[in-house]
Amino acid sequence: MLQPPVIKAFVERLDAEPVNAARVRKPLYQKRRKIFPKRAEGRFRRFKWLATLLTLGIYYLTPWIRWDRGAHAPDQAVLVDLAARRFYFFFIEIWPQEFFFVAGLLVMACLGLFLVTSAVGRAWCGYACPQTVWVDLFLVIERFIEGDRNARMRLDADPWTFDKIRKRVTKHAIWLAIGAATGGAWIFYFADAPSLLKSLVTLNAPPVAYSTIAVLTATTYVFGGLMREQVCTYMCPWPRIQAAMLDEDSLVVTYNDWRGEPRSRHAKKAAAAGELVGDCVDCNACVAVCPMGIDIRDGQQLECITCALCIDACDAVMDKLGRERRLISYATHSDYAANMALATGGGTAPVDPRRVRDVEGAFVDKVRHLDWHIIFRPRVLIYFGVWALVGLGLLYGLLTRDRLELNVLHDRNPQFVVETDGSVRNGYMVKLLNMIPEQRTVRLTMDGMPAATMRVAGRAAGAGRSFAITVEPDKVTSLKLFVTLPRGKAAEAEQGFALVAEDPPSHERDVYQANFNVPGVAK
């Protein structure tokens, strides 16, 4: 006979209610009800701390990392140099015409979100989203100054005293300082960080720097400190989008009511009276720790960010009671549905915990438990394959791209000039792009139109078919080129000619096929 569970410890029922769940949520313009999440402890909370430290560390510290690129390039590891129209990322330098690499990274980021959502639900929202990370940081400050949940609730209800004003002013001042640091860190990605910091302190920085800091300070303070869960519920489109990416094998945080129902605050007495008793003791610990103000026992909800803090809270209660963990757990819909069918006799009766346990109180073999191999199902592998192919394509492009480019623009007015001896001259604007931080000598050669010669304006060298051009490091070198075709050789102009830019030491070359206009066939 199934023995009632033995309760080994008293579990206090927390005075907590979901204020943001769908069944109790008010319209958008209803006054916001504050949420006072209780501090959670457990493996998911520790993982969130790790994610918070990692993401904030990357954001705040990256602009200060140095990377030696030589004397002719900035030494900041990650820099978006708008003035020079360059993007530097450690050993990678992206020019404007190579923006497709940045577009490729954005495509990879989108596919990465699809991949993560398909595999483990809204893990991005729960652990790495900037809104989640900064709200966590603001909550740390709030708890440090005002105390944990009960202390904060009492302080909020108390009249305004000197102590309350002191705590609130201190908290909001630190929040504003964090917002200012957030805005400051952002602008450091667009200029040399040490130089810009000095200019900011001495009030010599450009106005756009101060305005950017002001805007980001305000948004960080308002979103992370004042609005919090409302940003995720009402402003962010991702909760709506991600629902279309989940399937029955996606991992989501789930309350396993097939073993938790019927709930009872006095399980021992209820079991002694012969009543059906589930594992949930209705302590509200899961509600108290939720930063979104929902009750996970109401089922899957748009507001849930899958932070899994409710799992930590419930596991702690189950440990006190001497029961199995994972009353709330990561689970797939298919596993949940199978276990629910088992507990309800195929859906024909209410949940009966005796159907999922044997006479010794252990789960029967038919109960399905989480198998982490479900992550590697075809849908996830397809997402990963596409993501990896895009990444490999970008990597191949980076490794094989030339660092020398030749651009040629034919003069439009006039298209040609007939000289006194009957020869025809065309003018071209030539740009040589040296995309490495080293000066080099490029050989510019004319291929085709054998009778033609070329001359570089402003240079002492006479006409010829090949010139050595010194190009500056990491810059565009522009020059005016005149190509002259002798009288009687107009037939050669039909095929045009090619300009070849070549750097012999690096074996890099670029070719541009140019037109040559003559009287009667101007283009």
Image (cartoon, rainbow, N blue to C red):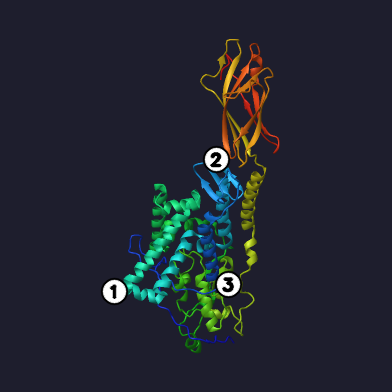
> Is label 3 in contact with label 1 (beta carbons under 8 Å)?
no
Residue 351 visible, this angle: no
**Picture residue at 65% right of the left edge, 34% below the top:** 441
Q: Horizontally, is 306 left or right of 441 in the view?
A: left
In the picture, measured across the screen, residue 31 lies left or right of residue 392, that is left
Q: Is residue 76 above or below residue 27?
A: above
Q: Nearer the viewer, residue 386 or 327?
A: 386
> Dividing the image into 4 quarters, which one contains the C terminus?
top right
Find numbered disc 1 in the image and state the secondary structure of the residue it sits on.
Answer: loop
User: In the rendered image, which quarter contains the N terminus?
Assistant: bottom right
Horizontal and vertical percent for residue 76? 55, 51
Q: Pointer 2: what residue?
A: 96
- Callout 1–callout 2 Cβ contact below 8 Å: no
Residue 192: x and y in percent read: 50, 50
Where residue 40 appears, x then y in whole percent? 49, 73
Q: Nearer the viewer, residue 155 or 15?
A: 155
The residue carrying pointer 2 sits among few (fewer than 14), some (14 to 19) or many (20 or more) residues within 10 Å by Cα, namely: few
Which residue was labeled with disc 3?
339
Residue 313 has which mark?
none
Where does label 1 land, which residue?
159
**Residue 21 visible in rendering:** yes
Disc 3 to disc 2, how far (Cα)? 56 Å
Q: Position of residue 115 (x, y in %)?
A: 58, 57
| Eye-nearest disc, 3 or 1 | 1
The CA span between labels 3 and 1 is 50 Å
Q: Please name whichever residue, 456 or 173, is drawn nearer the observer in this view of the structure.
A: 456
